[in-house]
Amino acid sequence: MWIDTHVHLNDERLYPQWMDYVKRARENSVISFFVVGYDWESSLRAVNLSDFDGIYSIVGVHPHESSSPDIDNLNWKSLITEKTLAVGEIGLDYYKLYSPKDKQKEVFSKFIQFAKEVKKPIVIHCRDAWKDLIDVMKAERVWEIGGIMHSYSGSYEVFKIICEWNFLFSFSGPITYPNANNLREVVKKIPLDYLIIETDAPYLPPQSHRGKMNEPAYLPEIAQKVAELKNTSMEELSIKFRGNLNRLFRRDL
């Protein structure tokens, strides 16, 4: 039994048929879903979806949306429910700079502070911004809440820093790509106690579905690759991932 720890059933491409995607996923032993927000509207959709069995919400602002003028005027605390697991996805993305670096860092800091206020872990997105990300994480003392490094693409050296701060490291479709040898080497080195998986659907489909829209039913392909890299069984991996998540969120999922 698998948990998709990062999926955008709230995305406009999946949301109209979200029940169909959940049904197909459950036919493939994916039983629970963490629906992750990236702005106010998507976070609100995540909360609404969490009314259904096996679906949990994560609410926040993606770094691409950091320049949105309404962020500070919205009542984010109103989105926190019993089934809200974390604050995210938040972080830094310098790849295309849809928002200025300073604004990204400002919003990232504010949402870490918000997560502390509501006593939730955080889910972090990072692309091409590792130094600044670590600097903000240190300044905001993220170890007080911990969290998840979503679709991790950093080095083993960065892992060794962040793993001390009560973080799990989530891997997605790219570990199945033929040219992702460096990423697979990182997976091999990271102890199982720190690993989880996700689809990030509708993004980052695994290799057998490259060029198509991703969906949570494809999660077992990612699990299979991790099982191969860690030389363990799918059953043992499933148990380990669930234990890691239960430890982070301090609840049975």
Image (cartoon, rainbow, N blue to C red):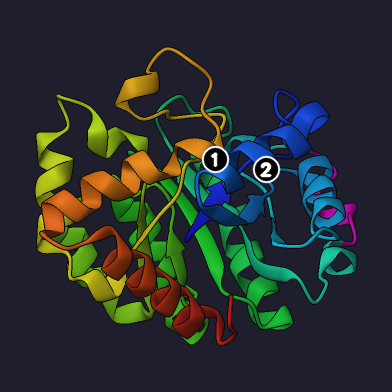
Q: Is residue 161 left or right of residue 14?
A: left
Q: In which quarter of the image is residue 80?
A: bottom right
Comparing 17 with 170, the one in front is: 17
In the orientation shown, which residue stands out farthest toward the front?
27
Residue 85: image location, x then y, percent: 65, 70
Q: Which mark is residue 22?
A: 2
- Residue displayed at 83% across by 62% down: 76
In the rendered image, residue 172 lying in the magenta stretch gets the answer no
Q: Is residue 34 left or right of residue 238?
A: right
Above or below, 85 against 26 in this view is below
Mark 2–mark 1 Cα distance, whole angstroms, equals 7 Å
Q: What residue type is labelled 1?
A: Pro
In the rendered image, residue 72 lying in the magenta stretch gets the answer yes
Comparing 227 with 136, the one in front is: 227
- Residue displayed at 35% across by 36% down: 173
Q: Is residue 56 visible?
A: yes
Residue beneath label 1, please? 216
- Residue displayed at 18% across by 71% down: 191
Q: Which amino acid does label 2 sit on?
A: Val
Q: Which quarter shows the C terminus?
A: bottom right
Whether pointer 2 and pointer 1 mark residues with C-beta atoms closer than 8 Å, the reply is yes
Residue 53: image location, x then y, percent: 77, 62
Give the SS element for disc 1: helix
Above or below, 39 against 81 in this view is above
Give the SS element for disc 2: helix
Q: Residue 11 carries which label?
A: none
Q: Give the range drawn in magenta.
A: 69-75
Q: Is residue 129 visible?
A: no
Q: Residues within 10 Å of mark 1 (few under 14, many from 20)?
A: many
Comparing 245 with 141, the one in front is: 245
